[in-house]
Amino acid sequence: MASSVRRSLMTALLVAVITMSSMSISLAARNLLQTSVPNLPGNIPNLPKPTALPPLPTIPTLPSIQGNNVPPLPTIPTLPQPSTTLPPLPSISIPKIPTVPQMNLPPLPATSLPNFPSIPTTMPSIPFFSPPPSPSGN
């Protein structure tokens, strides 16, 4: 009981805080919209002109090779070729997988399932909430 009262009180407090904060935001926005443009001075100071960038350094030149002083690339040695032929692969006989015999299961008896109670579809009458009986006419 106390937790439901506390929960509803916290919910009401949260709604009140959100409402107050949104009202203050909307008032601030309206105030910004209604303000006039401020009077700026007639001469706006100019920004200083940017200075020129220093020149980029020059790329050094690589030394050129005079004559034929470049050593030749190493050669990749070739692997020796097999001189004999490989023997044929042995033939393997795969055994046949036996089939699983089929089994006939007996049918389940009808009384093996428990009886579930039926769900009532009518609302039972509660004496405190039902109307009083009509007076009998004598």
Image: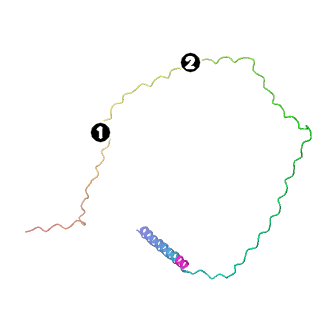
Q: Is mark 2 on a helix, strand or loop?
A: loop
Q: Position of residue 26 (x, y in %)?
A: 51, 75
Q: Position of residue 99 (x, y in %)?
A: 45, 24
Judge whether residue 29 is colored magenta.
yes
Judge whether residue 32 is colored magenta.
yes
Q: Give the range drawn in magenta.
A: 27-33
Q: Upstream in the sequence, badge 1 or badge 2?
A: 2
Query: Which residue appears farthest toward the front when viewing the image?
Result: 42
Q: Position of residue 1 (x, y in %)?
A: 40, 68
Vertical relation: 15 (above or below) 92:
below
Per the model, the C-alpha gap separating discs 1 and 2 is: 53 Å
Towards the viewer: 13 or 5: 13
**Residues packed near mark 2 inside 10 Å, few (<14), some (14 to 19) or many (20 plus):** few
Vertical relation: 113 (above or below) 56:
above
What residue is at 86 percent from the left and 34 percent from the top? 72
* Residue type pointed to by label 2: Ser
Q: Name the residue under label 2.
A: 93
Give the dominant element type of the magenta stretch: helix, strand or loop.
helix
What residue is at 21 percent from the left and 67 percent from the top? 131
Left or right, 111 with respect to 32, comes to: left
* Residue type pointed to by label 1: Thr
Vertical relation: 126 (above or below) 88:
below
Q: Name the residue under label 1.
A: 111
Q: Which colour scheme is used?
A: rainbow
Towards the viewer: 50 or 104: 50
* Quadrant location, the C terminus: bottom left
Left or right, 18 with respect to 74, comes to: left
Residue 40 position by quadrant: bottom right
Q: What element carries label 1?
A: helix
What residue is at 55 percent from the left and 78 percent from the top? 32
